Image: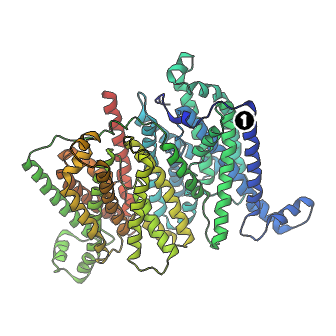
Amino acid sequence: MTRTADATAVSTVERPAPRRYRTAVVAVVGVALLVGFAVVHVGQGSAGIGLSRLLSLATGHADPDALAVLAGSRLPRLTAGLVTGLALGLSGALVQGATRNPLAAPDTLGVNAGGYLAVSLCTVSGIRLGILPSAAVAFAGGLAAAGLVQLLVSRGPMAPGRILLAGTAIAMAGSSAATVVLILNAQRAQGLFFWGNGSLLETGLSRPLLTGLIVLCGALLAPLLARPLDLLSLGDETAEAMGLRVGRIRLFAFGLAVLFSAASVALTGPIGFVGLVAPVVVRLFGVRRHAALLPLAALYGAVFVLGADVVARALLSASGTGDYEIPAGVVTALVGGPVFVYLARRVPTGDADTGAAVTVAAPGSRSRYGLIVVAGVVVLAGTVLVGLGLGDVHLGPGQLVRAVFGQADQLANGIVAFRAPRIVAAAAAGILLAGAGVAIQSVVRNPLAEPSLLGVTGGSSIGAVALITLVPTAPRWGIPAAALVGGVLALGLVMLLATGRRTAPLDPTRVVLIGIGVAAATAALVQVLSLRAQLQLAAALTWLAGSTYARSAGDLTWFAVPLVVLVGLVLVSRTLDLLGLGDDLPRSLGLPVGRTRLLVLLAGAVLAAGTAAVVGTVGFVGLVAPHLARRIVGPSHRRLLPVAALLGAVLVVAADAAGRWVLAPNEIPVGIVTALVGAPYLIWLLRRQKARADGA
């Protein structure tokens, strides 16, 4: 499908060629684990019917209740887990073989998200789909997502890290759009929520068996790719010299992988990281050749999915919250996120010495900069006025102006008084998130580094939800404080994992990849904590999506400390300029690089986590605003920070107004609107960087 760089990290997880018996041992261990998990899985459930009663059916004992539970719930769920695991394990092995990248998988390349969005749109539109039409729709969505990734990384060699960034951008765009669909359909929200996180809940055998037939037909074709994928592991040039048509083989492998992914999405929703973990585990056992790797990856994929569902149901039983179910996909993300981080620390990206490219403009005159700032203030003021007037009750221009000065009727004055704090919160959030993006990017030297991509917002969510769960009587101020601590700790963890050896140069792409893995794990943990705390589903979704709804003047006080930190960053802007030059030059000028990086990152974490404490998860502002500001005023942080702050404020205030206006009286959380804008912008930015690299 796309030519990838010959030096990839697949070899980093492979051990020397095993003895012939090792493959058999790996297979026997996998079968034993699968049988063990299957037995435990069948015995779990909330109906009060244990494994002993089910086993009694095999001895001819008549137990109508046990038979009904086994046929109506336990066997369908077990079959769904087996089919999904087999499909995702095969899909991941094919994708990794085609790209020679151990981080590649249907979910990390956006295929699952594309299929999920396509099926969600059909469901919301009222179209009733059977399993075959659902699989066809998911296949079309997954194929479209794979095509977009191909568009971003086509033409010429591409390092594994860049491919994954492109897949992450596509996945975020699809997931954001699907979240909008979920929020706008409250009546079906609970079912879509669980399905969207990968649930094995089934009420009959027809769907799993029919999906299994699709997977079986595809699996019969997979062995045809075993030898070609072995040749691809030697590199594109070597494979072509041996007569292999690399483009066709890669296209065939990706098409078959999308088919497997689509079948699993149609059956159980997008279950993440199975296609990543299963092939990696098999390789760690020393199995390299795809003739054995493909079936063993399918086997261990089934083991992973069933094991995850066993753990999820055990957690549910231990918590005593019988009204809720933890989706199996949440548990796979809790395991897969750390595995992704482990692999991201080893994958070569090619950016450690040079840093990622940053698009900048030539610095202009002081008068031009002044005009830009004035224009930004005027645009922000206009956006604030528009935001005050939009909503389920619209205010005309004249009525709005009178209400601002308190001279309108009581209704208009009340509406403006109610909306004003949320508008101020949106503006402050945009300012702080833009400042956080600038600070983090100055250290990481990557324009794609953004608080939500580096796990900061996820860490903040964990802090807030953990406090709600563990200390339900905590004071109201404790939630923002816990969110602040969680965000700072999450970013510290990402940088600790990314830096490794002190003498090693900072790799900007690796930092983002590790951040993506940490963010995935934190998101899964937040969902577990939310369900354990029995939070209302609609309220939890809205908070996690980022919302300014019903913010009061008291909430705005939490912005005070982050705003002071932002002013401090402006005062040390020349130091930020030096950090962008790498390590050697700043150190030769007497700058303590390590300590300065730590302080700047801490400042960025305070800005992002402080914002999340008030308005929840709002992503992509820290990516879009700094990038646009660099294109306007250049790289000097003395000018960059104020302009980025203005652009961030405009973006969040406009997103908040659009979320209240587009589907009034329904409201789209501001975090979803910024994601719908920011994810395509990230896609465009990746494409632009690729075009610039090709031109060079």
- The residue lying at 41 percent from left, 28 percent from top is 155
Q: Callout 1: few (<14), some (14-19), or many (20+) C-alpha neighbours within 10 Å?
A: some
- Vertical placement of 145 versus 678: above or below? above
Left or right position of 380 against 172: left
Query: Does residue 386 show up?
Result: no
Q: Say which quarter of the image contains residue 259.
A: top right
Q: Which colour scheme is used?
A: rainbow
- Vertical placement of 310 versus 9: above or below? below
Q: Nearer the viewer, residue 501 or 168?
A: 501
Task: State the residue position of label 1.
Answer: 23
Amino acid marked by disc 1: Thr
- Vertical placement of 318 versus 363: above or below? below
- The residue lying at 68 percent from left, 32 percent from top is 18
Q: Say which quarter of the image contains residue 231.
A: top right
Q: Where is residue 525 in the image (x, y as percent from the top left)?
A: 52, 62
Which residue is situated farthest in the right direction here? 60
Query: Does residue 68 show up?
Result: yes
Which residue is situated farthest in the bottom direction here? 410
- The residue lying at 24 percent from left, 61 percent from top is 566
Q: Where is residue 138 in the image (x, y as percent from the top left)?
A: 56, 46
Helix, strand or loop for disc 1: helix
Q: Say which quarter of the image contains residue 612.
A: bottom left
Q: Position of residue 271 (x, y in %)?
A: 58, 52
- Vertical placement of 27 versus 224: above or below? below
Left or right position of 12 against 665: right
Q: Position of residue 687 (x, y in %)?
A: 36, 38
**Quarter that holds the C terminus:** top left
Which residue is situated farthest in the left direction here? 367
Left or right position of 585 against 608: left
Q: Which of 225 and 560 is in front in this view?
A: 560
Q: Which of 687 and 396 is in front in this view?
A: 687
